[in-house]
Image (cartoon, helix red, strand yellow):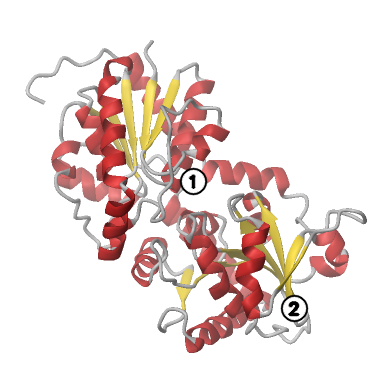
């Protein structure tokens, strides 16, 4: 049988595509991928072939969110790059039995341009944003085409809304981007990274704050000083226990130690290299007795160990909510994690995600964020309020993101399409 092509356009979309691809390969289905944004590292890590050379752009595929971003995309050639990728796809279109679009309008349009049958996991849109989803033109028209064999949404509310709007079934089968994370959490649940050298049993009783600067560069590096500004203002003790929180940053490999040290030094933070002589002591940033552990490529382990999350990230915040971790946002200059993006994410993910008011990067905003962070740690430590809040967060996770196993369920639905007769379509 001809292979399936996974067409995606973003970091989170690549995670979902790679999870789907891995499940399909376990079922004996040949899979290839075409990431329209970035290098598609998630596919490469999963061993899924990526079509042709790829490249990154400074806006991380989010230039459309602002005029400056659009101009940056034009200057860096992203529009012509995507057109070249779509041209490459069109030339290879007869190679594929099915094109699976993961993301938004762009991969949906790309799948339609191939002339082949397709299926769509519409992960980028949700009715939680507005109550009634307004799809960008011509996305709605494309999703109604008979050539689109199935449409899957990212939540049940969107499935109901789009089923009514499109006049066809739209199903919610779960979110594949959660599955690799939860598998990683299960594999590392027995130990919390860095606790042994940080104080053994005493460390285990302290709350853990996960710090997420994001995955896109150079934005993630630019976010780091803002996050450090919050951490240096965080009260040294919470809940009256006299115990300070353990601070752990989850970093992508592209955030190099030298760049981190250079970004942190003007704020008075000193980079300290990890020492493996007496145990797995992580590298850290330190300032006036405060210590931020630095963990590269250990996102699942850091999140599994956390009690609370301070985030300037998109997909990672959704994954934290899925684990019933409370998330405190800190908006930045972007191009991704701006005030507008953060506000939209709160509508998407519900009351488990909070954000202090105030202009980006200002002293008052950083101080307000630190105070809110301290209050959240106090609430978690409260013997009555803490467990109640955790149960509320679990209910939010189930409502907004669904159960685990989405990649397996969608892969099964794709296999059903592959095993059914190919439609003879006219005028589509």
Judging by the rendered image, the residue that carries numbered circle 2 is 244
Identify the mark at residue 169; answer none if there is no mark. Answer: none
The one nearer the camera, 103 or 241, is 103
Q: Residue 180, position in %: x, y?
A: 57, 41
Q: Nearer the viewer, residue 252 or 342?
A: 252
Would you say 316 lies left or right of 67 here? right
Category of crowding for the residue at label 1, using alpha-carbon neighbours closer than 10 angstroms: few (below 14), some (14–19), many (at least 20): some
Q: Say if 213 sits above or below 74 in the image.
A: below
Q: Is residue 81 above or below residue 226?
A: above
Q: Secondary structure at mark 2?
A: loop
Point out the frontmost of discs 1 and 2. 2
Question: Where in the figure is residue 318, as x and y percent of width and height?
Answer: 48, 56
Residue 176 in sight from this viewpoint: no
Residue at (85% x, 59% y) in the render: 196
Q: Residues within 10 Å of mark 2 (few under 14, many from 20)?
A: some
Q: Quadrant of the N terminus?
A: top left
Residue at the bottom extreme, as displayed: 364
Left or right: 72, with 319 as reference point: left
| Residue 133 spot, x, y in % from top left | 22, 55
**Among all residues in the image, which is located at the extreme top?**
1
User: Residue 251: x and y, percent?
Assistant: 61, 56
Task: Evaluate whether residue 326 shows in this view.
Answer: yes
């Amino acid at each position: 049988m001809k292979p399936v092509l996974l067409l995606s356009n973003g970091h989170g979309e690549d995670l979902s595509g790679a999870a789907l691809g891995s499940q399909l390969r376990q079922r004996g289905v040949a899979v290839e991928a075409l990431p329209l944004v970035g290098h598609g590292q998630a596919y490469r890590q999963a061993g899924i072939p990526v079509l042709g050379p790829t490249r990154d752009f400074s806006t991380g595929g989010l230039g459309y969110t602002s005029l400056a971003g659009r101009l940056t995309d034009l200057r860096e050639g992203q529009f012509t790059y995507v057109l070249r990728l779509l041209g490459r796809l069109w030339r290879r279109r007869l190679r594929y039995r099915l094109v699976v679009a993961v993301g938004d309008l762009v991969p949906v349009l790309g799948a339609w341009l191939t002339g082949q049958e397709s299926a769509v996991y519409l992960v980028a849109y949700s009715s939680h944003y507005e109550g009634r989803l307004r799809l960008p033109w011509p996305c709605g028209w494309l999703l109604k085409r008979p050539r689109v064999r199935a449409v899957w949404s990212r939540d049940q509310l969107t499935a109901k809304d789009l089923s009514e709007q499109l006049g066809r079934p739209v199903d919610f089968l779960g979110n594949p981007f959660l599955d690799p994370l939860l598998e990683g959490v299960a594999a590392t649940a027995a130990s919390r990274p860095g606790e042994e050298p940080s104080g053994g049993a005493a460390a285990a009783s302290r709350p853990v704050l996960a710090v997420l600067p994001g995955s896109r560069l150079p934005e993630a590096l630019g976010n780091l000083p803002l996050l450090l500004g919050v951490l240096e203002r965080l009260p040294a003790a919470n809940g009256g226990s006299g115990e300070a929180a353990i601070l752990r940053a989850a970093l992508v490999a592209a955030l190099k130690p030298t760049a981190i040290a250079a970004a942190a030094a003007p704020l008075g933070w000193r980079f300290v290299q990890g020492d493996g002589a007496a145990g797995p002591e992580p590298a850290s940033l330190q300032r006036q007795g405060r210590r931020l552990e630095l963990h590269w490529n250990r996102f699942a382990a850091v999140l599994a160990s956390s009690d609370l999350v301070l985030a300037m990230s998109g997909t990672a915040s959704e994954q934290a909510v899925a684990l019933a971790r409370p998330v405190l946002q800190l908006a930045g200059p972007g191009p991704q994690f701006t005030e507008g993006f953060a506000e939209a994410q709160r509508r998407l993910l519900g009351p488990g995600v909070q954000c202090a008011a105030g202009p980006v990067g200002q002293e008052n905003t950083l101080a307000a964020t630190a105070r809110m962070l301290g209050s959240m740690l106090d609430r978690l430590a409260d013997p009555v309020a803490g467990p109640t809040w955790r149960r509320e967060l679990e209910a939010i996770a189930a409502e907004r993101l669904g159960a685990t196993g989405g990649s397996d369920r969608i892969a099964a639905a794709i296999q059903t399409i592959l095993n059914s007769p190919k439609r003879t379509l006219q005028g589509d």
